[in-house]
Amino acid sequence: MFDLNKLVRENVKKLTPYSSARDEFTGEAKVFLDANENSLGSPLPKWYNRYPDPHQQKLKEAIGDIKGIMPQHIFLGNGSDECIDILYRCFCEPQKDNIIICPPTYGMYEVSANINAIEIRKAPLLENFQLDIIHLENLVDENTKLIWICSPNNPTSNSINREDILTVLNNFNGIVVIDEAYINFAKQKTFIQDLIDYPNLIILQTFSKAWGLAALRLGMAFASAEIIAIMSKVKPPYNINQVTQELALKSLENVEQVNDMITELVNMREALREVLMQIAIVENVFESDANFLLVKIREAKKVYAFLASNGIVVRDRSNVQLCDNCLRITIGTENENTLLVDALIQFAYQSVQ
Ligand SMILES: *Cc1c(COP(=O)(O)O)cnc(C)c1O
């Protein structure tokens, strides 16, 4: 049986969270002399002299409307990266608990676990980039608190089979985190609707990819109200700054534009995949559910260096498990994709000379 109370760290259970000045006051305030802000203003427009809403209420309501979920099921972080760190600090006792990742996958699960002194156990993906369920279940012990599943996965670009994720959710009494940073580019649908059936499920999404707002640093976690309450207790009070809250709210008025960009990027992804597969040195371009392609290419390291010398930066993943000779390439603009393809053709041509 899933028992959230058993998963939360003792110090977090006992914690009295920081209470901000604005938290302790209810009513209609006209005069704010409670938070030692600069009452005279700032060089910037009005209101930036004030601390932002620590609960991000308006923003959560707007996100909730779009995602079909209530604000009490939403946590906002300074990027998904902050959500990852906060999950460790809520549930994992340093030097004692462990977590499971399925490499090759997003690097921050491991870095953040190391920062927090949490043991990392690894159940590598199978050759087809799907979960090794048996290995995964063998790694679980009484100190396993979190299992990370990235779907679509970075850097392999595929979605993880829904049935396999459900198997993990049904058989693990700790918390399963599904990182859906790339879900908007996928054929597979989000697990948000499944929150109602799985109290052990947390879903991460972000404004950094489909929304095109990596600079704002805004990540989202969706989970039960109980899990969200614990995360909110642990977060720094003003983790989402005023500018990010305002601009994210504004961007949410333009969902259509975002959907158009997603459609365009998906079309460009498929077109670029076709073109890349025609190039002699390209051995495989894996089917992608994300806004990037994993490209298996002859002499990947040399190709990487050649592209770099032409001012084109891609991600060298050739040293990564299961990604031998692979480069991870983000879908660019039409012009950027053309520059990439031209450079690869030039390299291929030179290497047969
Ligand atoms: C890019 C990415 C993120 C986004 O992180 P932010 O901190 O929100 O920018 C999260 N997870 C994965 C797998 C990613 O590739």
Image: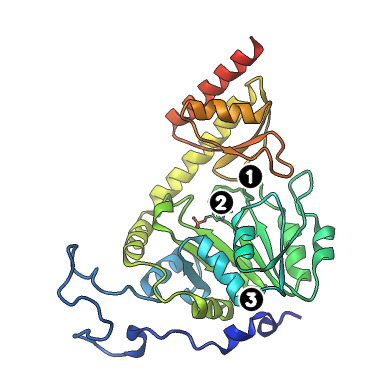
Secondary element type, mark 1: loop
| Front disc: 3 or 2 | 3
Residue hosting label 1: 157
| Labels 2 & 1 near each other (Cβ < 8 A) | yes
Which quarter of the rendered picture does the C terminus lie within? top right
In the picture of the structure, the residue carrying the numbered disc 2 is 182
> What colouring style does the render use?
rainbow
Q: Percent x, y for residue 324?
A: 72, 37
Q: How far apart are marks 1 and 3 (CA)?
A: 29 Å
- For badge 3, the amino acid type reads Phe
Q: In this view, does 243 lie to the left or right of 345?
A: left
Q: In this view, does 125 lie above or below 14?
A: above
Q: In this view, does 103 lie to the left or right of 28?
A: right
In the rendered image, residue 64, in percent from the top left (x then y), is placed at 46, 68
Q: Closer to the camera: disc 1 or disc 3?
A: 3
- The residue drawn where x is 62% and y is 41% is 288
Which residue lies under the disc numbered 3? 91
Q: Residue at horizontal 66%, vertical 81%? A: 4
